[in-house]
Image (cartoon, rainbow, N blue to C red):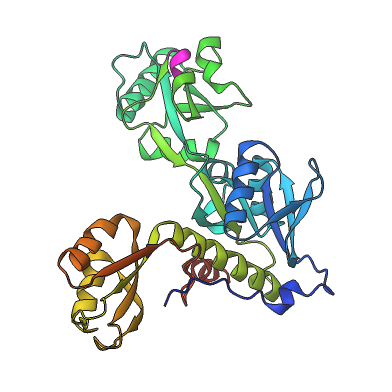
Amino acid sequence: MPIDLPVDLPVDLKDESQDLKTFILAVPSKGRLEEKSAEIFSKAGLTLIRDGARGYRGEMAGINSVRVEYVSAGDIAARLAEGSAHMGITGEDLLRGEIADFNSAIHLVSPLGFGQADVVVAIPDGWVDVTTMNDLADVAAEFRARHGRRLRVATKYTHLTTDFFARHGADDCELVQSFGATEGAPGSGAAEAIVDITSTGATLAANNLRIPEDGVILKSEAQLAASLKADWSDKARAAAKFILTRLEAYQIAKKQIKVCLRSSPGMASPILKPQKEIRELKEKYDAKLVDMIVGSTEQGGSSYTFILPANQQAAFMNDMIGNQLFAIGEVSKPDFLYFQRCEMLEHLLGRLV
């Protein structure tokens, strides 16, 4: 059952006599990623405190067991891969692109809704006969037969590119490691095609490159990710429980509303039957009953409180108020919605052995 109240901080996480930094959270050290990371934690009631504007360490207010480390987005992926950080925020492209054993090393806890960009294959505009990856595979085979070498693809996403090209039968390609300005590789003669990340495609277009119809490798965004190789002690798990419970409660509440339906004095009080009407409301509107008071007309009538998705508000209210089942419908926006189960935590613990 959801509750619209903050949970108490476990004693072993807030006791000021303890200074055991048993949980390491790695966050981006600068730019928009740092700002958005701090913002999303703050909105979830988890304030990050940095040691100075340019400091590389910090803490989470009120939780002595958590140490925050500010590092580059690429280094966060490396820290998670080696297990020297328990959780971190970085782009999914970096996690999948730079960690060879991604599936066994990393658990994606939650997408965070910012930092969106696509990892794509890009080819020269002049390749008018190449519209799909199958076409590119054919061109690569012809290129090798004609020139005696493989078609070169510049990228920093070697793992993602290798897997993607293999799935499309484009085996006659050679990956060329890129360390920056990848979009310029075809123009400079360093490669014939590229795999790079783009938000709008404007840079690709400026360099006379385009994306094949099925050339999107990954739709990436910032992720809260957990390391499966870190030391998940009891205190580290307790810190994760508190952080993920708060974060999930905030994320759920963003998309939900709370509606209190009441009959007015003198109005016949409707009684919603749990085995029928309430079940039907759950199926029709995903409306969860969280509180009810059944009273007589003389006592002021009945009231029922529901939590439901915000995009169902108009239809739900029309059904309940418009059809005169209830006289009053009060709508509010909860800050947090806690459930008995935290799915983020359960999924993480299910990966830890």
Magenta stretch: give its range. 204-208
Q: Is 305 displayed left or right of 315 in the figure? A: right
Q: How far from the left and from the top, in percent, is residue 79?
A: 69, 51
200 shown above or below 246: above
142 shown above or below 71: above
Answer yes or no: is residue 312 visible: no
Q: Identify the image quadrant of the N terminus.
A: bottom left
Principal SS element in the magenta part?
Answer: helix
Query: Of all residues shown, which one is farthest toward the left?
Result: 323
Answer yes or no: is residue 340 visible: yes
282 shown above or below 273: above
Q: Identify the image quadrant of the C terminus.
A: bottom right
Q: Residue at x 34, y 82 (%)?
A: 292
| Nearer to me, 62 or 167 | 62
Q: Is 342 displayed left or right of 90 in the figure? A: left
> How many labels, in total?
0
Would residue 319 be counted in the magenta stretch? no
Q: Residue at x 82, y 73 (%)?
A: 18
Q: How far from the left and from the top, in percent, is residue 123?
A: 41, 20
Q: Residue at x 34, y 57 (%)?
A: 310
| Nearer to me, 275 or 345 | 275
| Nearer to me, 258 or 22 | 258
| Nearer to me, 51 or 94 | 51
Q: Residue at x 83, y 68 (%)?
A: 19
Q: Is 202 displayed left or right of 284 in the figure? A: right
Q: In which quarter of the image is residue 239?
A: bottom right
Q: How far from the left and from the top, in percent, is residue 346?
A: 50, 71
Q: Is 103 displayed left or right of 67 in the figure? A: left
Q: How far from the left and from the top, in percent, is residue 52?
A: 82, 45
